[in-house]
Image (cartoon, coloured by chain):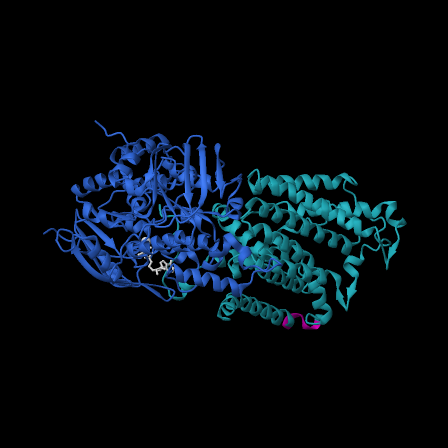
Chain colours: A blue, B cyan
Amino acid sequence: METTKLRMQGIQKEFAGVKALDGVNFELQPGEVHALLGINGAGKSTLIKILSGVYQKDAGSIQLDGKSIEINSTQDAINNGIATVYQDPQMIPSFTGYENIYLGAETEKKGLFPRINKRNLREKAEALLERFPVNIDLDRTVSELSAVEKEIIAVLRALSKEMTILILDEPTSILTETETEVLFRLIHVLKERKVAIIYITHRLEEIFQIADRLTILREGKNVATLSTNDDETNNHLAVAELMLGKKLDKIYPEKSTSIGDEKLSVDNFSLAGSFNNVAFKVHGGEILGIFGLVGSGVEELGKTLFSVIPKTSGTVRMNGAELSLSSANEAISNGIFLVPGDRRDEGQINDEPIYFNVSLSNLKRVSRATGLIDHKREKHCVQELVDQVQLAARDINQEVSLLSGGNQQKVVISKGLFTESQVYIFAEPTVGVDVGAKTGIYHLIRNLAEQGKAIIIISSDCEEVFGMCDQAMVLYKGHVTLQKSVHECRLEEMLLCGVTGGKTSE
Amino acid sequence: MNDKKLVIFSDTFKPITIFLMMIVLMFILFGFFEYDKGYLSTRNIRMLFTHMSISAIAALGLTYVVAVGHFDMSFYLVGCLAAMTTSYFNKTDLMMNSFMLGNIHAFVIPAVLAGIAVGCLWGLVSGVAVGIFKLDDMVTTIGTGFMAFGMAYFYTKGSFIYDNFLTSGITEINDAKWFAIPFPIILMAALYFISYLFLSRSKHGRCFYATGSNKVAAIFSGVKVKHYIIIAFVVCSGFTSLAAIMTTAAQGVGSVKASLNFLMPAYAAVYIGIAVFKKPTVIGTFFGALFSAIMLNGFTLMALPFYLSDLIIAAAMIIAIMASKIDWASIKKKKSNTAPAIHAN
Ligand SMILES: Nc1ncnc2c1ncn2[C@@H]1O[C@H](COP(=O)(O)OP(=O)(O)OP(=O)(O)O)[C@@H](O)[C@H]1O
Ligand SMILES: [Mg+2]
């Protein structure tokens, strides 16, 4: 047996009275892919942030190659060969992709004005792209990039460092199948070079594809460390139950049985450069799923329906009457709400409390005729919703930026529920959400449908669309490649239509 | 049922306690040194609040702009234009021929309103440029500000306007008293009260803060971001114009430099407020302005030259900004758990 690469023992971390980590142990062998699992708020990100120097541990020890080390800054971690892709990578929006990759590491030269050789940076970045071959234009500024592209930049940035440990915090919650595959290939290459990898994800099926071992955390404590080769662990449900600490219900709720009147009907809907000629109808009580990879136009389709992007052509009818919407504000007042996919940038007001976020889209509901807010009513309504989505938070006065990823998503969904809309568009509703909460969100969505709302789920997770929806639509490069009732189609067919456009490659 | 109220109360209560402690401390300090000069006399305290009201109203306007996440470098210059506009109207023959309302000529009212309207118009220009055309706020408002300042010279090529000041009754804006309370203090109290309701208690206030905090998310939430940015700039210029007209009334002369020294005290008040309340609030700005006013007043009694008090207040602002960046909780625990900064380095 080789020497253990990393040994973290008895790690403790407390945030303002919340014990995020309570004596966690974690070990890593060279060349191992070690999955770190746990439900939202279990402490996964906190543990790896301690390892990468973002947070300092309150107690415990870290040994690297058998030697005790202290990691006091992110620079310490990098110097120790620990590279990290964070769950919410921070970048400078006005810098290009290249500049962000090499931020703070532009040159080896010392001095007050070390010269930065742009050409050199570009060559290095291109060499990186050969190792992680994805389709991305690094000359664009980060503010123009989509969430997927930002994630890719974050991975490239980690790869640009000399490393023996690579930490990936939920990379695939944003990436789609195509990039995920590239990432997995890359992980295999790194493994062969004896790089040890810590891999955090909520997609359990991935673990059995790439991980050698897995460690499960619950409420800041170790629950188990297992090898994925064992038969008994080779089973999503067993792992999910260990994470949750209780039996898991069925993931997807029953499909709809009663379909109401036509709610939303969209014809000839186009956005130049993104999607063409999309047409569909959604009835009350029905869930329409739209599956498509990044770049297929699904993301834009959602935003265009919600009128944050102006459409190029097409008509939208609600209950038979044609709508002409020119802003999200008008969409909301006409009963359409989009729960956006990129919650950090589009979904939430970070430094404000939960109640502020939840009520923001429908302040009328909690204000008096004078325009003043009725705090009592607001608290009551928000609390009710927050209980309904089972948000794990201290109370509704907590800042949303302090919540774990999955709980932030629940806040954004609560905000949507608060508007009491007729048509809900959910973009990537379960990104970064743990299995337990995922089930909760699915049931919530189904519940909404049962109340007679029309629902559209836009997702790059084919299984989600297949499992949740009554009607399915698949977009490939802006064109509809499949549109039928989910009862009549197979998962493989949908996946194929989304990934290749429906043509089997010869 | 009331615990929510309690929490909201305690959230604002802590910062207010901090401020009250600071202010009591300063009163004790100055009172101790300046007792013989009547620092703690009713007269001095009334004077303190009267002086304060002008800079406090300008700072209140600026609070709106900072709340929507922008900067305004034009308001103090726009105030000069407003002051000159009012002074110019005050000088016209129309003024002395209008009927009397008590001891002021009725035409004073449209003269004041004209000044404020010109100010608001200028705010509208900045607001549209920043909110709709998405121009950079700093550069744009430096531009619009100096345009306004240039315009202020048009009336008299820059010379003072004395005409009618002693006779039209315009000085009453500064001198009038209601129940022994000087009119400027009443104006300040009224504007602060309305702004408090508007920014901190109404649904519109939420939209201002949402816009300032995350524009994209605000748009996705149905907030009319552009409207709120424009309103903020209009309010800022409008309030500053009023403050500049109040200065004009107090000095009894129309000057192109009426509000030229508003810039630093207004930012100081807003940022001292942010340092304690963590975001630009009406109450925070009020205490920020009060804080500066107490210092200024104390230094004046101590006969410190004006440039020294400017220096000290500016320094207080910088210290306040630094203090707001410090994570007190982590210092208490002697361990840093600062929020993740940019992860790259
Ligand atoms: N900076 C912080 N301040 C206060 N509390 C925090 C902070 N960061 C994390 N927490 C709390 O610590 C706990 C663990 O959070 P962490 O982000 O590690 O969860 P996670 O396992 O990564 O969850 P997710 O799967 O949702 O990303 C949560 O209860 C969270 O609210
Ligand atoms: Mg996490």
Look at the picture and state if B59 lies above or below A503: below
Main secondary structure of the magenta stretch: helix
Of residues A465 and B136, the one drawn nearer to the viewer in this rendering: A465
Residue that extends furthest to the right in the rendered view of this protein: B97
Task: Tell me, yes or no, whether the highlighted magenta stretch contains residue B33.
Answer: yes
The residue drawn where x is 30% and y is 44% is A466
The residue drawn where x is 56% and y is 67% is B22
Residue that extends furthest to the top in the rendered view of this protein: A506
Residue A414 coordinates in the image, percent (x, y): 43, 55
Q: Is residue A453 visible?
A: yes
Q: Is residue A126 left or right of residue B235?
A: left
Task: Tell me, yes or no, whether the highlighted magenta stretch contains residue A123.
Answer: no
Residue A5 coordinates in the image, percent (x, y): 18, 52
Of residues A246 and A104, the one drawn nearer to the viewer in this rendering: A246
Of residues B251 and A278, the one drawn nearer to the viewer in this rendering: A278
Of residues B343 and A419, the one drawn nearer to the viewer in this rendering: A419
Residue B63 coordinates in the image, percent (x, y): 59, 54
The residue drawn where x is 80% and y is 56% is B171
Span highlighted in magenta in the image:
B32-36
Residue B215 coordinates in the image, percent (x, y): 50, 46
Q: Can residue A142 be seen in this view?
A: no
Q: Is residue A263 left or right of residue B317?
A: left
The residue drawn where x is 42% and y is 54% is A451
Residue that extends furthest to the left in the rendered view of this protein: A1
